[in-house]
Amino acid sequence: MEKPRELNPSELMHEYLRQKKKFPHIWCSGCGIGTTMGAVIRAIAECEVDRDRVVMVSGIGCSSRMPTYVDFNTLHTTHGRPIAFATGIKLARPELEVIVITGDGDVAAIGGNHLIHACRRNINLTVVCINNSIYGMTGGQASPTTPQGKIASTARYGDFERAFDLCDLTAGAGAAFVARGAVYYARQLKKLVMQAFRKKGFAFVEVVSQCPVYYGRFNKFKSPVEMLYWQRDNTVNVKAAAKTKPEDLEGKLLTGVLADHDYPEFTELYDKLIADLAAGEK
Amino acid sequence: MVLMQGNEAIARGALDAGVRFFAGYPITPSTEIVEIMSVELPKVGGKFLQMEDEIASLAAVIGASLTGLKAMTATSGPGFSLMQENLGYAYMTEVPCLVVNVMRGGPSTGLPTHPSQGDVMQARWGTHGDHPAIVLAPSSVLDCYVLTVRAINLAERFRMPVILLPDEVVAHMREDVTLPDKVDVVDREAPHVPPEWYYAYDDSTTDVAPLAPFGTGFRFHVTGLTHDRAGFATTVPAEIDRAVRNLKRKMDRFRLEIIQVERVHLADAEVVVAAYGICARSAEAAVLQARAQGYRAGFVNMKTIWPFCFKLVERVAESAKAIIVPEMNLGQLVREFDRAVCGRTQVVPISRVDGEAITPRQILDVIAELARPGGKD
């Protein structure tokens, strides 16, 4: 049998996008969400999952517009709540592959409670948080990941609050899989999303991204490219970090897989309970 | 015949109506429903989740419903307030589900273990924006069962959230009930077209567009943004107008089918008591006692409070000298009576907000005063 022709990267993207229906998209030039969307699509394609079984769920914000553009079962929910919606979908039909696309404001501010409890519950979801350190859609307000001292439209004198480290937060809350990638490292990002997608349990991927229009302009980045270079210069792969002197890691973000544990998965436990009850064993 | 509690009857009704998903958060006085569902659902292959709050509970319910399962949650005032956000989402996205709100005293934490009917307006207008609402109010333990089944059927049929609004007395009261051997169960309509022709919000040929479950080949988009017939966000004025009006259209068209009221002695009634929930039980007792004493009193038990039974009240206003509306609040549904009656007859509220139920005696006294020849007009 003839092997189907490999799609080239551009054909692959077109294959998975609702290109006739919903384009042009809403994202600004230089934004990191498009790169992330590409990585997510390539990851799902390489995992060879039937797209009828893929559900993409998002909250509110720039990143959360992603489900509009991709040809899966797509659910654009309320602000901060996508993990809770996704939890219902996954438990109701564990055979579906549920991926949550969210942002730092969505998942760490208004949705912070749902995030930590999902880590603890360990239901098999993949959460991709595109962290641009600001509220982009509403015009550049400070978010829980805006670094201390940086400028936002609601922190014109510099943000007093310390930023959340989302990977520390989720690892601390007991997530089975935690990884950090960056838009600058798009190929590594795809691999991390694939690992998260294949992980049986709650998997969280933080994507260090750039918002040139708000965060960049407020904080004196001259161009989106300069922001990408910032990502390159301020991240260290976790494997390389092991061989680096602690003082050289000061202020750097670790990328790669930061936590990977095997815990009992919620839907499997639940299905076992149903089977045991049916067999009269409880 | 079995001795059963209201909350227990709600859980039983939900299971018999085919509910297979429940997500909830404990709150007095609805907790028994959550507890019973956690035990019973896995026995029938259903799923139960205790979520981190009521916001997440309704979110999970909506997610589960989108995969095709009949889904519900149960809460009380403070939790119902938190649910308003995702309740609006369910109205907007037209996802069937049942929300049970066992009413306790408010505002705020209020009276967790005492009854109230203070959430009547919140159940109608609690979430932002224009939207329809179907709200049912049981007045007995049997009602708790029957109306739960009905609420789930209405949700599936009309593709929208439905609210069951018992008060704390009805939910915690135990009564002897004989449950029906069999109940009619309505399942939501599945699409009749192949995926490439499917529009999840196309109501141009039908009043309620069929809803395809996620994972069955219909890869459609769902959003809380105002959307076009395919489900994608729109800012086209004509599409926005259609989207907002169509939510209401199905309610208008099927109003008579949705509204269910029980009428007793209305034909010659001079004074009519219109009530819902536990007040309807007191009202019924009061009206029967009044009849025994020679007063021409009648009684309406509003099992559907929203949509409101305007037509019936208009007719009653033509013949009755007064309509008494007893409520365990400062007067909420009575405003609808004022609107329907338009001054054609007297509308007399009885209001009680001390955490106790309105007694038959209280209502009887008002009937006697109004129905007595020479009584106040």
Image (cartoon, coloured by chain):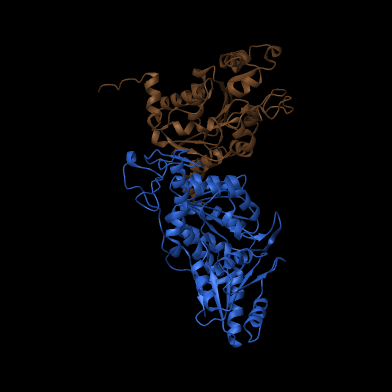
Colour of chain B in the rendered structure image: blue
Residue B287's spot in the image, x, y percent? 59, 80
| Residue B85 vertical placement versus A39 (above, below) | below
Would residue A93 be visible to someone looking at this image? Answer: no
Would residue B151 be visible to someone looking at this image? Answer: yes
Q: Front-most of B169 and B270?
A: B270
| Residue A82 vertical placement versus A130 (above, below) | below
User: To which quarter of the image does residue A182 belong?
Assistant: top right
| Residue A61 vertical placement versus B23 (above, below) | above
Q: Front-most of B134 and A117?
A: B134
User: To which quarter of the image does residue A139 belong?
Assistant: top right
Colour of chain A in the rendered structure image: brown
Residue B251's spot in the image, x, y percent? 46, 57
Quadrant where the C terminus of chain B is found in the figure = bottom right
Q: Front-most of A154 and B150?
A: A154
User: To which quarter of the image does residue B339 belong?
Assistant: bottom right
